[in-house]
Amino acid sequence: MRLRCAVLDDYQNAATTVADWSPLSDRVEVVSYRDHFTDEDQLAAALADADIVVTLRERVAFPASLIERLPRLKLLIASGMRNSVIDYAAARKAGVTVCGTESSSTPPVELTWALLLGLARGIVPENNALRSGGPWQSTVGADLHGRRLGLLGLGKIGSRVARVGQAFGMEVMAWSQNLTQERADEAGVSLAASKEDLLATADFVSVHLVLSDRTRGLIGAEQLALMKPTAYLVNTSRAAIVDQDALLTALHEGRIAGAAVDVFDTEPLPADHPLRTAPRLLATPHLGYVSRANYERYYGQAIEAIEAYLNGEPIRVPG
């Protein structure tokens, strides 16, 4: 009898088309779920007969309470090697092997610039006005050349965002709790004296930090108040780094020129969520990692992980 593999949150029905699952066809039955399961009871019912689960990024949490309700589960594959919503200890206790995949930093870098440029040049309102017969030119774009780009985080993604900013002729400044002068010099950027200094002087602020106890709520009402009224904030990292209510207030009161976000406290975003109608906001449904090349990598390596597990040699098992 073939094992049953459940692929979660396959919104675009892409999982079975971007990769070749045929090598598993005689041993594994693949079932793709396009709709997101909103609670643990729904998820446990859907996965009751699953031996293998492939989950995309951190869309679905696998706490101990869920793992305990899935006695057939033997292999859990998550895209990316770091996943904050899987209880690895509970998985080990239940005899569930957890494997990861590689993930490219290129797509989130590209989306960061799509959002920043969209904000700076009013692309969405101008496009909407043109298509609806509205006014011809209603915004005045913000320049990038000669302006300051402030990066919160200068890791794999932040450093690549910095290089693009430099190509636009921007002055790039960065800050994080662990950022050293040596690392800033290597990237060719200025090291901000403090987070507050960066927020107060940057024309564009982009978040590229890992979510942790130290970064949760890092930007709240007090920090947003430091930003110039002409400045823009971009967050393609983790929603909880920026206080959502404080950002909504800042947007409604016009304290900053605008914001772009790709991440949310609740995903998918509820239909009546206030961020859907907030002014001065450009929002996308967590598209940072959603690209064909990344999907080919995620699902192609998920297939490799399943084959390796079935051969008794699991691969890419997080330490």
Image (tube, rainbow, N blue to C red):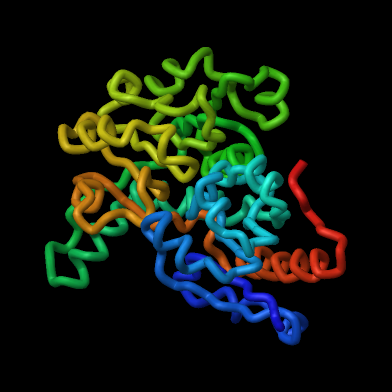
Residue 229: give x, y in percent of width and height. Answer: 25, 29
Give the image location of residue 20, x and y in percent: 70, 81
Outermost residue, left direction?
A: 134
| Residue ID at (40%, 27%) | 217
Report x, y in % for residue 134.
12, 66
| Residue at 48 percent of width and 73 percent of height | 33
x and y percentages locating residue 231 in the rendered image:
33, 33
The answer, for residue 168, to whether it is visible in the render is: yes
Q: In the rendered image, which quarter contains the C terminus?
A: top right
Observer able to see residue 167: no
Q: Quadrant of the N terminus?
A: bottom right
Residue at horizontal 35 percent and vertical 21 percent from the top: 223
Image quadrant assignment for residue 181: top right
Of residues 239 and 99, which is closer to you in this image? 99
Asked if 83 appears above or below 233 in the picture, the reply is below
Q: Nearer the viewer, residue 232 or 58?
A: 58
